[in-house]
Amino acid sequence: MERLKIYLFFLILLSAFQSVAQQKFTISGYFKDAKTGENLIGATLTIKELQGKGTGTNAYGFYSITLPTGQYQITGQFVGYAPQILQINLNRPLKQNFALTEQVNTLGEVEVSGQRKNENVSRMTMGMQKLNTSEIKNIPVLFGENDVLKTIQLLPGIKPAGEGSSGFNVRGGSTDQNLILLDEATVFNASHLMGFFSVFNSDAIKDITVYKGNEPAEYGGRLSSVLDIKMNDGNDQKMKIAGGLGLISSRINVEGPIIKGKGSYMITARRTYADLFLKLSSDSDRNQTKLYFYDLNAKASYRLNSNNRVYLSGYFGKDLIALKNTFGINWGNISGTLRWNHLFSDRLFSNTSLIFSNYDYKIFINNGNKLNIISRIQDYGIKQDLQYFIQANSTLKFGFNSIYHKIIPGVITADSNIDLKKLTNKYDWENSVYLSHQYRINDKIKIEYGSRLTLFSTLGPGDIYTYDPNGRITSVTAYRSGQFVKNYLNAEPRVTVDYLISQESSIKLSLSRNIQNLHLLSNSTSGNPTDLWIPSSNIVKPELSDQFSFGYYRNFDNDRYEFSAETYYKNLINQIDYKNGAELMFNENVESQILFGRGRAYGLELFLKKKQGRFNGWISYTLSRSERKFDAINSGNYFPAKQDRTHDLSLVGIYELSKSWTLSATWVYYTGNAVTFPTGKYSIDGKTMFYYSDRNADRMPAYHRLDLGATWINKKNSSFESSWNFSLYNAYGHENAYMITFRDSKSDPTRTESVQTTLFKMIPSVTYNFKF
Amino acid sequence: MRRSYPFFFKICKDCTSVKTSPVFRILGGTVATVAMILIFGSCEKVIHLDLKNSTPKIVIQGNIYDQLGPYIVKISNSVNFEASSNYPPVSGANVTISDNTGQNEVLKEPTAGTYITSKLRGVPGRTYTLSVKIGNQNYLSAATMPPAVAIDSIYFSSSLFSGEMITTVRLLDPPFIANYYRLVYFINRVQQKAFYVLDDELFQGATIRYALLSRGNNIKLVKGDQVTVWLESIDHGVFEYFRTAGSDGGESASPANPVSNISNGALGYFNACAVRKITTTVSQ
C-alpha cells in the first residue's frame, strides 16, 4: 500500500512535470445522439495524428483527453452511428461535443460500422461483455419479451440457472454472487413470475455491461460478476411514444423533453395479463386466480449548465399471485437514484449518487386462521465517483461508497395485528473506498491496477448468538442500537495487463479479489421470492474469491470476425451450504443451519462473433468445472457444485433477409446440473423413503433447445414505425427435464420409478411493436 | 406421457413441510413451477435412469406408547432403487429397551425382523433408551415421552385450494411448554402415507387447527368414510425426524436423509409418545 502511494505520487508529479515541459491542452465534452439527445456510453474518440491514442466516453457520455498543442483530425464514433470527423487547432482548452446520427440501417451493415473496430482486442478490461439493446432485439425469446438477462446467458461463462430462469451462474458461482445494478441501485431479485421474465424492460434500457469477476475497482459487493444496467435518459428533442402488444404482456414507453435540449424524461410501463386466460377457464380454481406482474421505469435528467447535470431515476415492480382470497403472495423491487454530474475542471469528472433500494415480499393466507407475513431488505447509499483524466495515457478513478443495509427477515402477524413471530432485524453498514489507475505504458502495453477497501460493520440492536457444532446456542449477547457487533475490513486488489501483439491480436492477464458480505439463503433448485438475504456476522464470514484469468483476443478478416479465448481459475473461501434438513424459513437461529467451506472453479471460454454482414451472430462455448468442499458433506472431499456444467454451447444467428424481414435462431446445449439422486430405498410406516449417498454425484440429462424468431418491419417512415415479432421457443419440442422426482410406480406398487417433468414444449408467440 | 395440471393444493401435497403449518408448506414448495404450469401445463413422463447402488443400510422403526403393549421395533435393510420394494427383515438382533427408572426388557422376535415387548409399560415423563446390537454393530437411541394432549374435535370442510373434503383436527395446546405433535391419519382403517408433524411455536397455549391435506395418494373422502386420527405427543428428536423426512426429494437442491435420532448411521426413528385417538364418520 505504502509503495503504491509513492508510485502514485511520482506519477502525478511526472505528469505535472511533463505538462510544464510541453504545452498541453484538454479537449473534453459529451457524446450524444443527435436525434434524441441520449448520452452515448462507450463512444470513442480517435486522433489521426496520434495512432493508438484516443479515449472513450464514460457512463454519462463524457470524455476528456489532454494532448500537446497542435493541429489534429479527431473522429468521434459509436456503434451504429455515422462517425463525425473534425479538424481542430488545439492551442487552448477546448469543449467539443459530438452529436452523432444513427445510421440508416442499410442492408448488410447491421452494426459496428462505428465503434473502434478492434475494440475487443484493444480494450482494457477482460472477462467483460457489452450489449446494447439494439443488438438483442432480434434474438428470439420466450413469450416474445426481449430480455437482457436471457440474452447474456448466451455468452460464454454465463449460464442459466434453469429452464426459463432469469437467475444465472457466472464462472461457477451461485446466483446470489451476481451484483445486479439498475442505474447504480442494487436489484435484490431480478425475477418476475418466478424467473420466466426478468425485471428489466428492454424498452427502458440503454446499455448492459457484464463483468465476470474482473470488474474495475469502482464495483464491489459480489463474488462472481457485476451486471451493470443503465436506463435510457429520455429524448430531449421530441416527444416519442413506443410500445408493444404481446400475447401475455404489453408495454408502453413515453419520452420527451422537459425543456428542449436541456432536460428529458422517460416513463416505461409493462404489465402481463396471463391471468386473463385463466378467467376463460371453466374451472373455478383457475378462473379466480390472479397471476400477473407489472413494472414501471422512470427517469428524468436536466442540464443545469455546462458543468452540472442531474438525473433522477426510479424503478417500481410488483408480482402478484393470489388464489380466491385465501392465499396470496406479492413481491417486488423499488429503487431510486438521484445523481449529480459535476465537472470540477475539464479533466476532473465527478458523479455523486444517492441510492435507495428495497425488496420485499408479503404473503397473506386465510385458512381459518388469517396470517400475514412480511419480509424486506433495504439499502440506503451514497456513492461518490471521481475520474481524473491526467493525460492521454493515464486516467485515475477514485471514490467512496457507503451503504446502510436494513434487513427485516420476517414478521408474521395475525389478522388482529398481533405479532405471532418476529425475527430480529439486521442492521449493517458497508463502507468502501477505491482507487484505480489506467495507464498506457507504451503502444503495446496497458495496465489497470487498483484496489477497493471495504469495511463491513454489523450493528445492533439485537441478540447475537454463538452456536456449538450441533447448532445449539452456547451464548447470547444483547447489543444496543448503533453498537458495533462485528467489523470486517478487506482489501480487494485488482490488476489487468493488456499486451497488444498486433492491431489484430492481444493477450490479457488479470488478477482480482472480490468480497461478498450479503448472502442469499436458497436451497431450492429454482430460487423462490422468499429466499432470505443474510449479512456477514459473528458467525457468517465474508465470502472471498481470488480469480486469475488469462485471455487471447484475435480479430480476423478486417475485424469482421472477433475471437476470444479466456481461461480462469478461481479460489473461493467461506462458501455457504446447509446442514441436512436445514430449517431456513422463519428461523431466528438460521445461522446455526449453515455450513462453511471452500470452493474452486476453472474453465475455458471460447467466443467467435461475426459482427457485420447480412448474416451475423456468435458461437460461444464454455468448458468448466465448479467444485465445493465442506467438512460435513461427502466426507470433506471436493464435490461438484450444483451449477457445475462441463459443456455449455450457444449458437446465435441473425439473418437480414430483406429490409423488412430479419430471421434469427439460437441453439443452446449444456450438460445437466449436478444433482443428488437416490441410491436406495426403504420403508417407514408404509411410506417409501429414498436413501441418498453422496451429494451431487449424479447429473440431470443434457439440455438442448432451438428457438426461432422473425421480425417483420411492416411500416417505417420518419413519423411512424411498426413491426411484428414472431418467435417459437423450443422449436423442435425437445422434452428437457425441469425436474426429476421419484415415486412408487403407479402400475406396480412393488416398484419405484423416476418421473421427469418438462415445462415448455414449443411456445409460439407474437408481439406487435410500434413507435411514433 | 400425460398432461398434468397441478395446482396450489398440489404444493401442499407434494413438497411437504418446510415448516409444518400450512403457510409454510406453501412457501416451501414450488410456487415457481406452479405459476407457469398453471398457464401452460407441463408434461410428466416416466423415464429410466441408471441410478447408483448403495450397500444395504439398517432401518429401525420403534414406537412406545402410553398404552398397553406390546410395543414393536421393526428392523430391516434398505435395497437398491431398481429392486422390488420388499425390504429384507434383519433377524437375530439383540434388542433392548430400558427406561430411566430401571425398567429393562430384551425384546422377542416372533417373526423375522419384528421385535416385541411383553411387560414394558410406557409412562409419560420417562426417557426410554433403545439398544440394538446386530453383529458387532451397536445402534442407540433415546426418546422422552411427553404428557398426553387431547384432541378437542375433528371436522370436515371443503378445501380452500381444491374444493375437496378435508379433515381438520382441533386441539388445545398446553401453555408455557414447547410441544411437538405427530398426527397419524387413517381413512377406513388404512394409514395414509404422509407425515404430519407440527409444533406450537406460533400457537403457544392456543387452539390449533391442523388440516390433514391428502398427500401421497388421491384418495377422496366421501360420505360414510370412517376417519381415525391419532395425536401423538412427541419429543423434539422425533419431531426433527419427521420434519426432515417430510421434505425429501422434490425441489430441494440437495435432498438428504432425514435427521435420525438413532446413532451409528441407522435409518429410521425411535419414538416414545403419549397418544390420543379419535374416530368419526364423514356425515356430509
Image (spheres, rainbow, N blue to C red):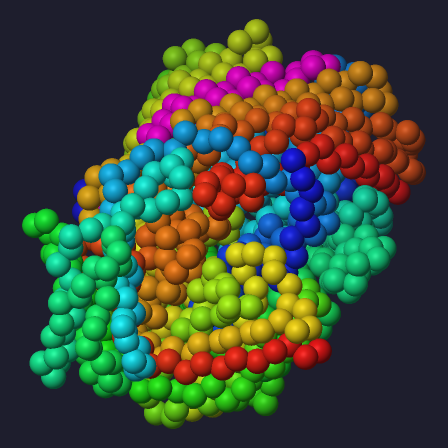
Toward the viewer: A567 or B46? B46
In the rendered image, the vertical position of residue A169 relative to residue B178, given as above or below: above
Residue A436, quarter of the rendered image = top left
Q: Residue at x 70, y 26 (%)?
A: A731
Q: Is residue B191 visible?
A: yes
Q: Position of residue A404 (x, y in %)?
A: 42, 68
Residue A304, quarter of the rendered image = bottom right
Q: Is residue A644 visible?
A: no
Instruction: Tell me the quadrant of the picture where the C terminus of chain A can be found.
Output: top right
**In the image, is A146 to the left or to the right of A16?**
right
Q: Position of residue A138 (x, y in %)?
A: 72, 29
**In the image, is A217 to the left or to the right of A286?**
left
Task: Say if the magenta span includes residue A699.
Answer: no
In the rendered image, the vertical position of residue A143 relative to residue A417, given as above or below: above
Q: Position of residue A412 (x, y in %)?
A: 51, 78
How many labels were placed on the picture? 0
**What segment carries the magenta color?**
A602-630
Q: Position of residue B139 (x, y in %)?
A: 15, 58
Q: Residue at x 15, y 52 (%)?
A: B92
In the rendered image, the vertical position of residue A552 relative to residue B274, given as above or below: above
Toward the viewer: A371 or A399? A371
Task: Say if the magenta span includes residue A613.
Answer: yes
Q: Residue at x 54, y 86 (%)?
A: B153
Toward the viewer: A687 or A274? A687
Main secondary-structure element of the magenta-colored stretch: strand
**In the image, is A729 to the left or to the right of A555?**
right
Q: Residue at x 58, y 9 (%)?
A: A558
In the rendered image, the vertical position of residue A279 relative to residue A170, given as above or below: below
